[in-house]
Image: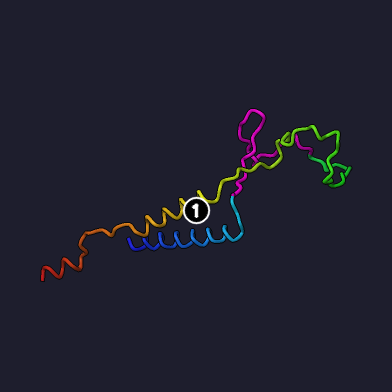
Amino acid sequence: MHQLRLIGLVLFITTTFLAMAAAVTQTTHIRFKRPPRDANGNLIDESLPATNQPTQVPQEILPPATAIPNPSTANMPLASSPSELQFVAVPVIYPLLVAGTLGLMLWFVPAPRSNSATKKRKRRR
């Protein structure tokens, strides 16, 4: 039971330090990578090799993309290709509140009232 209370204390202290770090760096959101999906909305397994990718290295090397948009591609949607990374933003406060509350609950959980074996032995003598 004491280990559980100690885990709660460590969790609460860690959450406090993470909250202070988020406040100092002015972090408001955590971004998680969204798993890739196909056009039908089904998850794509990244461990399998893609069938539509060429197996040979192309001979032509393209220059890096510039920051100035091309007028002919300006009307194209940004998330048109399935290989682009997509992220989900979660506010920092929610995981910190959950972890801090769980830590406090574990820390202040009442101790069991059962008698230990040493107390029973003292009563018998």
Instruction: Locate residue 123 relative to residue 22 in the image: left or right.
Output: left
- The residue under the point 11% across, 68% down is 124
In terms of image quadrants, where is residue 87? top right
Few, some or many residues within 10 Å of mark 1 (<14, 14–19, 20+): some
> How far across and how far down the image is residue 122, in percent?
15, 70
User: Please, what is the three-letter code of the amino acid marked with disc 1?
Assistant: Leu
Q: Quarter holding the C terminus?
A: bottom left
* Residue where numbered disc 1 is placed: 96
Note whether 20 is above or below 62 in the view shown.
below
- The residue under the point 60% across, 46% down is 32
Residue ranking furthest to the top: 40
In terms of image quadrants, where is residue 53? top right
Please state which of residues 21 and 39 is positioned toward the viewer in this rendering. Answer: 21
Q: How many marks?
A: 1
Examine the residues drawn in magenta and state their main secondary structure: loop
> How far across and how far down the image is residue 104, in percent?
39, 57
Please state which of residues 96 and 60 is positioned toward the viewer in this rendering. Answer: 96
- The residue under the point 40% across, 59% down is 8
- The residue under the point 59% across, 49% down is 29
What span is colored magenta in the figure?
Answer: 29-54
Question: Can residue 51 be seen in this snapshot?
Answer: no
> How far across and how far down the image is residue 69, in percent?
83, 40
| In the image, residue 91 lies in the stretch drawn in magenta | no
Residue ranking furthest to the left: 125
Determine the secondary structure under disc 1. Answer: helix
Instruction: Locate residue 101 relative to residue 26 in the image: left or right.
Output: left
Please state which of residues 38 and 15 is positioned toward the viewer in this rendering. Answer: 15
| In the image, residue 36 lies in the stretch drawn in magenta | yes
In terms of image quadrants, where is residue 61? top right
Instruction: Locate residue 11 relative to residue 60 in the image: left or right.
Output: left
> How far across and how far down the image is residue 101, in percent?
42, 53
